[in-house]
Image (cartoon, rainbow, N blue to C red):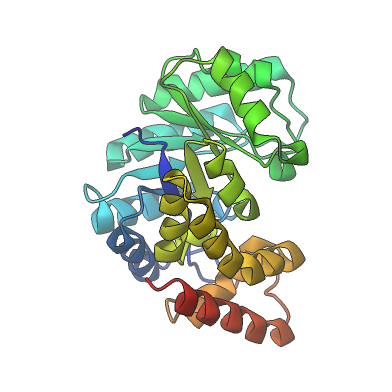
Amino acid sequence: MSLFEGLSAFPITPADASGRVDVEALGRILLRIRDAKADSIGLLGSTGGYAFLTAEERIRAVDAAINAVGGDIPVIVGVGAIRTSDAQTLAKAARIAGADGLLLAPVSYAPLTEDEVYEHFAAVADAGQLPLCIYNNPGTTKFVFTNSLIAKLSKVANIAAVKMPLPAEDDFAGELAYLRGHTSPTFRIGYSGDSGAAPSLLAGGDAWFSVVGGLLPAQALALTRAAQSGDRVRTGEIDGAFQPLWTLFREFGSFRVMYTIADVLGLCRVDPPRPVLPIPEAARGRVAVAVNELQQRVPG
């Protein structure tokens, strides 16, 4: 099985108001993912708030993760940074710490051209010397990968997969067909955007890069396995149980809601990094109800 297949669970990175990572709380969350038998951990993704952490805290989080679960479950580390040299340093540090793979987004203040993104990814992939996944996240980076650029990058040494946003008009089949027709058979194509997990996996996507899997890995894995087996009825039932959370994600943003879920589960009580604010107090009860009902309908 490829590193970039199945359920990749993306946890929050608990930290105090100054950005100091709470390694004990992070360890609790990662052990929960390991024990649920997810296929990998996506550490320091967007849900992990990597952009809000200093390089030193990011490296500290990687060290803590490898100490907690390294060797038990593959750990994919986000290494996005504005400067190519900084991303290279983070990639090297992740490899030295014992990470299994890398995730890279084209983070930038100035809008980037396709040539600039290509050179950036080639340089970081070479520095990291680990399997690297392209992080296509235009909602955050404002850079839209064309299918032709993904195909070109797939031929670069060490670039092994892409993490895609949900396609226009939910055309998973068409997008997968194009990309698979222009990349090697070993190149993996997965999707983020939790509300589209079921259709993306049923269409043949290789991976679900899951926000909710970072805190509710057993339920996310049940959805993943049902879809991978082609059981459309069971997939629909589990996806239906997730719908209240998908609604909250759309209303408040999954990043904010995840911090409330962590509190509801008793894993940690921390706020999102400022300037991001917690969800309104009046909505916290809705999160608790959604989580509790999900756990009842899809036991861990």
Q: In this rendering, does residue 99 appear at all?
A: yes
Position of residue 117 relative to residue 252, above or below, is above
Q: Please, is residue 49 above or below residue 199 in the view?
A: below
Q: Position of residue 279 (x, y in %)?
A: 70, 75
Residue drawn 38% across and 66% down?
29
Q: Is residue 296 above or below residue 81?
A: below
Q: Residue at x 54, y 20 (%)?
A: 180
Left or right of 24 in this view: 240: right
Between residue 60 and residue 135, name the one nearer to us: 135
Q: Name the residue: 27% across, 41% down.
A: 98
Residue 181 sits in quarter? top right
Foreground residue among 6 and 66: 6
Quadrant into which the N terminus falls? top left
Picture coordinates of residue 268, whole percent (x, y) = 45, 77
Q: Position of residue 198 (x, y in %)?
A: 57, 50
Q: Nearer the viewer, residue 53 or 129?
A: 129
Q: Residue at x 70, y 85 (%)?
A: 281
Q: Is residue 62 left or right of residue 278?
A: left
